[in-house]
């Protein structure tokens, strides 16, 4: 019987863990978070396969997207993409970072791989990874069927990332394996916590005995 993954189990994935998606085992290489002042939150996991493929698993919490506030995505980072305006063959990627940092108006429509994407939203907030924090501006686009997402992310350190993603569901994942290192750390943490409780109980009993018997 396949061990279906719950949303909570998926959310608890950390570097060193593994999870299976569509018959392929994926290693968790990195974990980071992003949040803006309005409460929009994204968790991001970098997945890699033994074959060398890499994807990002995203958990998006949008307080304005009710009644479904949480959506999961599988995203593919695009290397050297060409983004076009509908009426032009000019690649706008070289000027995108500057446009976004200068708070320019997002383009209403973009063309990627002959597919049209339409602007939907913009977010700006802090991105946390490996103990570091950066500012990030994101422009989100969707195709006409609202099945494929195009995300353009401009970081403060002159870094631009472009992704395409699709909606996925936690029950499409299975066979989570926690890293042995994390399991060992959790075991040691539990032992330490138990010893602290025992020591505290002994000290309490000693204190009570001294109060009673002087």
Image (cartoon, helix red, strand yellow):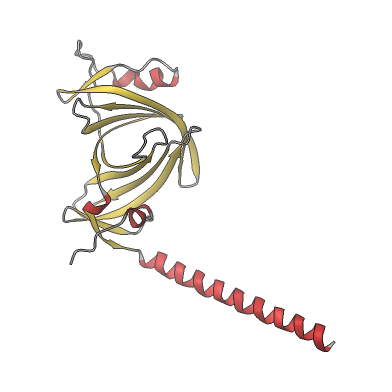
> Viewed as shown, does residue 38 lie left or right of 5?
right
From what the image shows, is residue 163 above or below residue 200? above
Query: Residue 171 in the image: x percent, y percent?
Result: 24, 53
Is residue 144 visible in the rendered structure shown here? yes
Query: Residue 185 in the image: x percent, y percent?
Result: 46, 67
| Residue in front for this viewpoint, 23 or 197 | 197
* Residue occupying the point 81% across, 82% down: 211
From what the image shows, is residue 188 above or below residue 114? below
* Residue occupying the point 43% across, 36% down: 40
Q: Going by the picture, which residue comes out furthest to the top?
A: 87
> Viewed as shown, does residue 122 lie left or right of 48?
right
| Residue in front for this viewpoint, 193 or 146 | 146
* Residue occupying the point 37% across, 40% down: 69
Query: Residue 200 in the image: x percent, y percent?
Result: 66, 76
* Residue occupying the point 81% across, 86% down: 212
**Can you tell which quarter of the image residue 199 is in?**
bottom right
């Amino acid at each position: 019987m396949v061990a279906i993954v719950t949303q909570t189990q998926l959310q608890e994935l950390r570097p060193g863990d593994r999870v299976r998606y569509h018959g392929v085992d994926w290693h968790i290489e990195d974990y980071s978070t992003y949040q803006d002042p309005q409460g929009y939150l994204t968790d991001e996991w970098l997945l890699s396969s033994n074959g060398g493929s890499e994807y990002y698993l995203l958990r998006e919490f949008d307080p304005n997207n009710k009644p479904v506030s949480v959506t999961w995505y599988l995203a593919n980072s695009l290397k050297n993409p060409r983004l076009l305006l509908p009426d032009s063959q000019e690649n706008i990627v070289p000027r995108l970072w500057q446009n976004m940092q200068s708070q320019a108006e997002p383009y209403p429509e973009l063309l990627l791989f002959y597919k049209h994407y339409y602007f939907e939203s913009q977010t700006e907030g802090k991105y946390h990874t490996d103990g570091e924090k950066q500012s990030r501006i994101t422009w989100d686009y969707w195709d006409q069927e609202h099945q494929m997402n195009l995300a353009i992310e401009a970081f403060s350190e002159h870094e631009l990332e472009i992704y395409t993603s699709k909606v996925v569901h936690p029950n499409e994942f299975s066979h989570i394996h926690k890293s042995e290192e994390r399991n060992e750390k959790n075991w040691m943490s539990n032992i330490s916590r138990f010893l602290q409780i025992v020591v505290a109980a002994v000290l309490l009993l000693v204190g009570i005995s001294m109060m009673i018997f002087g």
